[in-house]
Image (cartoon, grey):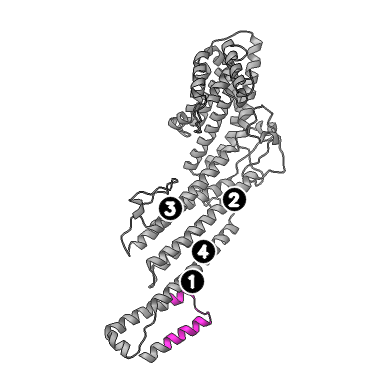
């Protein structure tokens, strides 16, 4: 037996020197040798083995070393599958119900099959499963980040062809046919509108479109998050054969805090859920980026509607009560907003999004766009320039009435007969606009008191009434309100 064991060790060492051993082969060999060692220990005592100078095969040392090598082999295989599937992907949805493409299906099929294969081997250990989970996590992260970069490239791409904006919006169909493959957005608008803080109403010369190909990439990231959670559940099921595990599937808290119960969760599970949270952040950033692509169109459209409305009001030479203002000018204003933004730009893009993206992601993008519109309306009520110059061109009370009417129209548009945003979401996103609107109708003395109260306070929270907001309202009254004029002058002198 001694000679037999020595020959086995010599053969093993010889193969190691020639580097002809794969991780899988060595782990299988170690498992068999472990069984042989157990059988030898059952038949011989430690003293007998020591007296005969019989050394058993060192299973622990060799298996740990080649466990890493085997994991490396699996990593190469998984990454090869990922790269191949990405190179072959045409970014077409699998079918009418499955809105992501085949690359994410191929990648997770490989991940699930390999997990099943490892779990079925004789040499499977909890350590091996943990190491493989790291491989899968890194691969899925790489896949998601690659898709993120593709999406960002699509959003930055400016098409060479330029079809006029007016030509596009006069088409009969609300969703223009895509005659050739487009990158995500045809960012075909004038460069002076790329500055998001512009307050003019420059004519928009070009239009943009979302493409199904872009949306599929976005869906793939969403599907990766869902599939990764399923894979983690399968991993935990396999690990539960070794010990009891707390399978808390909550995503990692961005605060980084850890409760006592969370500290008891399996470490590999926590690592995987951090990756899920990272993918969620990628999705949120892309969804916000999509919404921001519409921002350059919003304020020019609103400014144009309000300007034309004011010109029409001046022609009448009659001050009308709010009900009559809404009745006479509201319908015209809504139609102009439809023509310049809602129906001409937003509807074609949202139609493609709604048909190709998963519902949850669609609603998040809708909410982001609605929030941006509300922010732009706030900027119209209290333009930033109002705090820097006296008597700035703030809108008047009649225009504010029309703006409020337009906001109600936008609400109806985004509610979509119950198929769009919920009333609760709309109310939450609209809250700050309503707070600013209250300032617009507040009497001057109360505004001055509020201005003094907020002076010197540094509140960096978004959507909170600040000193600059109140001062902007007072600046808008500079030419028609002596008290506001006197206070604004005093503020300028103090500064």
**Label 2 environment density (alpha carbons within 10 Å; few <14, some 14–19, many ≥20):** few
Q: Residue at x 42, y 57 (%)?
A: 231
Residue 404 or 443: which is nearer the viewer? 443
Whole-Å distance between the Cαs marked 3 and 1? 25 Å
**Label 4 environment density (alpha carbons within 10 Å; few <14, some 14–19, many ≥20):** many
* Relative image position of residue 229 (x, y in whole percent): 42, 53
Question: Looking at the image, is 94 positioned above or below residue 174?
Answer: below
Whole-Å distance between the Cαs marked 4 and 2? 21 Å
Kindly give the residue lying farthest to the top in the view shown.
318
Kindly give the residue lying farthest to the front in the view shown.
494
Whole-Å distance between the Cαs marked 2 and 1? 31 Å
Question: Which badge, 3 or 1, is on the more N-terminal residue?
Answer: 1
Residue 388 or 493: which is nearer the viewer? 493
Q: Which residue is mark 4?
A: 78
Question: Which badge, 2 or 1, is on the more N-terminal residue?
Answer: 1
Whole-Å distance between the Cαs marked 4 and 1? 14 Å
* Relative image position of residue 446 (x, y in whole percent): 49, 15
Q: Which residue is mark 1?
A: 69
* Relative image position of residue 3 (x, y in whole percent): 39, 91
* Disc 1, SS: helix
Question: Which badge, 4 or 2, is on the more N-terminal residue?
Answer: 4
By secondary structure, the bulk of the magenta-drawn segment is best described as helix
Question: Looking at the image, is 104 positioned above or below residue 75?
Answer: above
Q: Which residue is mark 3?
A: 273
- The answer to whether the residues at label 3 and label 4 have Cβ atoms under 8 Å apart is no
């Amino acid at each position: 037996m001694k000679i037999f064991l020595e020959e086995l060790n010599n053969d093993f060492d010889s193969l190691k020197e020639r580097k002809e051993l794969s991780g899988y082969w060595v782990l299988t060999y170690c498992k068999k040798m472990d069984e042989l060692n157990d059988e030898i220990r059952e038949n011989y005592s430690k003293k007998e083995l020591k007296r005969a100078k019989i050394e058993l095969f060192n299973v622990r040392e060799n298996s740990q070393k080649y466990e890493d090598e085997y994991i490396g082999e699996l990593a190469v295989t998984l990454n090869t599958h990922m790269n191949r599937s990405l190179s072959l992907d045409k970014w077409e949805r699998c079918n009418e119900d499955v809105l992501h493409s085949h690359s994410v299906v191929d990648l997770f099929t490989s991940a699930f099959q390999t997990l099943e294969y490892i779990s079925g081997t004789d040499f499977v250990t909890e350590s091996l499963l943990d190491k493989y989970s790291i491989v899968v996590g890194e691969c899925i992260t790489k896949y998601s980040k690659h898709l993120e970069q593709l999406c960002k490239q699509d959003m930055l791409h400016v098409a060479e062809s330029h079809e006029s904006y007016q030509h596009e919006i006069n088409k009969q169909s609300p969703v223009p046919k895509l005659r050739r493959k487009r990158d995500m957005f045809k960012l075909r608008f004038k460069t002076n509108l790329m500055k998001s803080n512009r307050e003019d109403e420059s004519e928009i010369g070009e239009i943009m479109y979302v493409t199904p190909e872009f949306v599929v990439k976005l869906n793939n990231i969403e599907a990766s998050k869902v599939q990764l959670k399923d894979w983690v559940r399968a991993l935990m099921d396999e690990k539960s054969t070794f010990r009891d595990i707390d399978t808390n599937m909550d995503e990692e808290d961005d605060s980084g805090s850890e409760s006592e119960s969370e500290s008891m969760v399996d470490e590999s599970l926590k690592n995987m859920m951090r990756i899920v949270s990272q993918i969620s952040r990628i999705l949120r950033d892309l969804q916000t980026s999509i919404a921001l692509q519409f921002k350059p169109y919003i304020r020019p459209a609103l400014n144009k509607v309000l300007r034309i409305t004011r010109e029409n009001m001046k022609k009448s030479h009659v001050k009308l009560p709010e009900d009559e203002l809404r009745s006479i000018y509201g319908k015209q204003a809504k139609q102009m907003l439809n023509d310049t933004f809602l129906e001409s730009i937003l509807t074609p893009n949202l139609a493609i999004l709604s048909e190709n993206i998963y519902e949850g992601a669609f609603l998040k993008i809708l909410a982001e766009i609605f929030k941006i519109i509300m922010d732009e309306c706030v900027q119209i009520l209290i333009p930033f320039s109002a705090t820097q110059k006296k008597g700035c061109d703030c809108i008047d009370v009649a225009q504010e009435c029309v703006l409020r009417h337009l906001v109600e129209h936008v609400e109806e548009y985004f509610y979509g007969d119950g198929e769009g945003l919920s009333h609760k979401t709309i109310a939450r996103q609209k809250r700050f606009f309503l707070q600013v609107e209250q300032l617009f109708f507040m009497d001057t003395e109360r505004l001055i008191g509020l201005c003094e109260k907020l002076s010197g306070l540094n509140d960096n929270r978004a959507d909170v009434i600040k000193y600059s907001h109140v001062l902007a309202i007072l600046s808008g009254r500079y030419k028609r309100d002596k008290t506001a004029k006197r206070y604004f002058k005093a503020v300028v002198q103090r500064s």
